[in-house]
Image: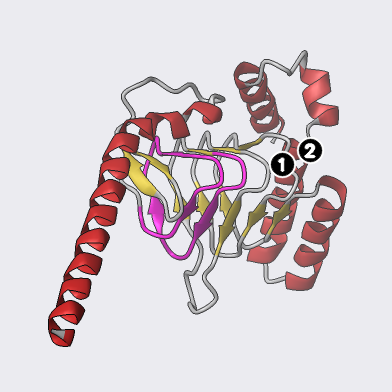
Amino acid sequence: MFASLRDHIRAIQREDPAAKNALEVALCYAGLHAVLLHRVAHALYKRRLYVTARLISQLGRFLTGIEIHPGAIIGKRLFIDHGMGVVIGETAEVGDDVLLYQGVTLGGTGNETGKRHPTVGNNVVIGTGAKILGNITLGNNVRVGASSVVIHSVPADSTVVGIPARIVNAKAKVGLLEHGRIAACGEEEGPDLELLNDRIRELEALIRLLLEERVAQGRG
């Protein structure tokens, strides 16, 4: 257990330039505390001590602002940066070396039973405020832009942005903590969308002209 904790702390130090030393991470990082409390709650949950497990998860929520259901399966070295408002549902599965920012939700859609929360692969980055909803899968090395809403599965090595989220061609390299640059990877699509908007306006004007001609002919 201590070896795993040391590995987790070292991973946070490696990825977060704000982490000055191991003691600071151990004492001050709410994301680490939330994961550690979840390990205890999950062990009790597997033993069907559901109420005790939920009490521990609620304690974790009170102390950290991060809500992880004790039934969720969490991999190694999950880094929840800041973390306030993060919610991870009961049947969610999170792989190794995943980074979640504040306000992320791994939730359900409200109309599913059984496996109803997302499965997140290894080395995934999910930006601030993003919502991953339903029994979908994010493959390994996926990047999710801030405030995106993902409702369909995403293949490995993809970058998704928007509401609903769409896959973009991320030509620029994006570092693990550079989630602010993820949305910029899709900016090359901007001109195409503007052309589509112009075309729609042209078609609307043409339809109005045809309607006016038909009305004029009827009066004649």
Residue at 51% from the left image edge and 63% from the top image edge: 117
Q: Is residue 71 left or right of residue 51?
A: left
Q: Residue at 26% x, 42% y: name it.
A: 195
Compared with 41, 14 (above or below) is above
Q: Are marks 1 and 2 in contact (CB under 8 Å)?
A: yes
Mark drawn on residue 83: 1
Tag 2: residue type?
Answer: Ala
Which region of the structure is painted magenta? 127-153
Residue 194 visible: yes
Quadrant of image for the N terminus: top right
Q: Is 201 on the left or on the right of 11, as rendered?
A: left
Residue 201 located within the stretch drawn in magenta: no
Q: Which secondary structure, mark 2?
A: helix
Residue 157 visible to an observer of this rendering: no
Mark 2 lies on residue? 30
Say what amino acid the circle numbered 1 marks. Gly
Q: Answer few, some or many: residues within 10 Å of disc 2's Cα (few below 14, many 20 plus, some between 14 and 19).
A: many
User: Relative to 39, is 23 on the left or the right?
Assistant: right
Work out whether mark 1 precedes mark 2 in sequence or the reverse, and give the earlier one: 2
Give the residue drawn at x 73%, y 36%: 82
The answer to whether residue 25 is above or below residue 120 is: above
Residue 174 image offset from top left, x and y in percent: 44, 23
The circle drawn on residue 49 is: none
* Residue 24 image point, x, y percent: 83, 21
